[in-house]
Image (cartoon, rainbow, N blue to C red):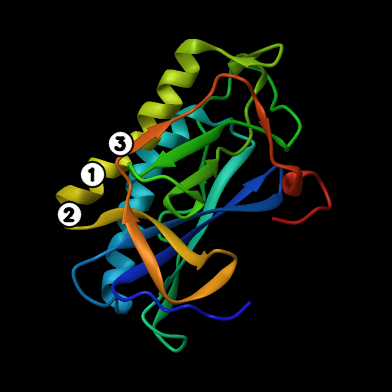
Amino acid sequence: MGFVASPNCGEFGLQITVNGQKCANVFHVEGAAPYNAGTLTVVSAFLTTWWFDNIRPQLSNDVALTSIIARSLESINAPSIEFDDTMPIVGSASTNGPILPHNVTVAIKWTTGLRGRSYRGRTYHPALYEGQVVGSIVDAGELTQLVDGYSALIPALAAEGYTLVVYSRYANKLERATGVCTPITNCSADDVVDSQRRRLPGRGQ
């Protein structure tokens, strides 16, 4: 699996701990010009603010954002940084019961208006807690807040001149010569809980 360049695109890996276990959520953001250390820092700081305002209130205090690893996808030697200002950011929903097993999640679905695997993405929300789930169903009000929180990232980035995208490295199971970035237009989620097996203890990120 080699490196596939994508002009003007940046990769932002949000490093998260769940009861001390490491996991990550990765976002791709396209700008108007190639990223440098300064613009990687700007977008990382922006993502930190978005997380604090929109995602932290939906998380148990057993969950924390600890840093963002950001890199330009312009070339294999393009700039990269690790951003950890104001971190760790600990979840603030601390009165709604303990977290469920680490693999229990909501799959946030990102769509672009185009069909095919290259044009849709998912973000697995870290660590649902007991107060958010009844049986295998996420409470309707809690689900609305989660979708609203993630959806807020799309217009907020646009207002700063950046675009949240689905980044595709492959077509028909073959690596592309150049990565394709497609603007995300919508965010949704099913109310049935999902499972991210890689987040089970000892499985890695």
Left or right of residue 46: residue 70: right
Separation of residues labelled 3 and 2 (CA atoms): 13 Å
Amino acid bearing label 1: Ala
Counting other residues with Cα less than 10 Å from the Cα at mark 3, is it few (<14), some (14-19), or many (20 or more)? Answer: some
Left or right of residue 93: residue 79: left
Residue placed at 70% from the left, 23% from the top? Answer: 98
Residue 116's place in the image compared with 69, above or below, is above
| Camera-nearest residue between 130 and 28 | 28
List the residue tagged with mark 1: 156
Residue 32 % position (x, y): 18, 68
Counting other residues with Cα less than 10 Å from the Cα at mark 2, is it few (<14), some (14-19), or many (20 or more)? Answer: few
Separation of residues labelled 1 and 3 (CA atoms): 6 Å
Contact between labelled residues 3 and 1, with CB atoms less than 8 Å apart: yes
Contact between labelled residues 2 and 3, with CB atoms less than 8 Å apart: no
| Camera-nearest residue between 100 and 57 | 100
Answer with the quarter of the image where residue 38 lies. bottom left
Residue 6 % position (x, y): 37, 74
Secondary structure, mark 1, is: helix
Contact between labelled residues 2 and 1, with CB atoms less than 8 Å apart: yes
Secondary structure, mark 3, is: loop
Amino acid bearing label 3: Ala
Residue placed at 32% from the left, 78% from the top? Answer: 37
Tag of residue 160 = 2
List the residue tagged with mark 3: 152
